[in-house]
Amino acid sequence: MLKNAPYKFSEFESMSIQYGTRDSLVNKYDSKTGDYQYLNRADSLVKMKLHLSKDDLLYLHRKAADLGFWDFPVDETGDSIKVGSKQPVRYIIEFKYQRKSKKVVFDTNFDGDIRLVDANLA
């Protein structure tokens, strides 16, 4: 069954993640280039190179499969209303393979199936 899966690790190319408020997705990582940037506690933008090992990428690939990432809806966005005084956080996660890719946009205020919300937050 795993050999016939649509997302095979042998065809894995890269994964990327972006997160932050909708108007400011400054926290980013791309495994292909190793570019990693984030805002630290002092609101300073920190940029560095961070290359993940093949084992790290295999772990992420398997974790995505365990959580059912390939079956997640592409759009899991919430409304733009602030939660208290904070903007909801948006995550954009993408896995790229030779023949396919999967990209999911998830907002922390997404009001969908609780099991899906829990899987996204895991």
Image: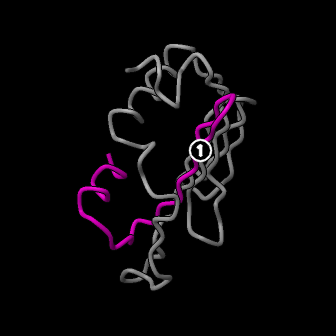
Q: Is residue 82 above or below residue 39?
A: below
> Where does label 1 land, which residue?
94
Q: Amino acid at mark 1?
A: Glu
Q: Is residue 66 above or below residue 21?
A: above
Residue 8 in percent (x, y) is at 53, 23
Task: Tell me what residue is drawn at x 71 percent, y 34 percent.
Answer: 48
Residue 120 in percent (x, y) is at 37, 52
SS category of the residue bearing label 1: strand
| Magenta highlight on residue 118 | yes
Q: Is residue 18 above or below residue 97?
A: below
Is 73 situated left or right of 52 in this image? left
Task: Tell me what residue is drawn at x 61 percent, y 59 percent.
Answer: 43
**Tag count in the figure?**
1
Residue 111 in percent (x, y) is at 33, 73
Q: Among all residues in the image, which is located at the extreme right?
A: 33
Image quadrant holding the C terminus, namely top left
Is 113 situated left or right of 10 in this image? left
Residues in magenta, as a range:
95-122
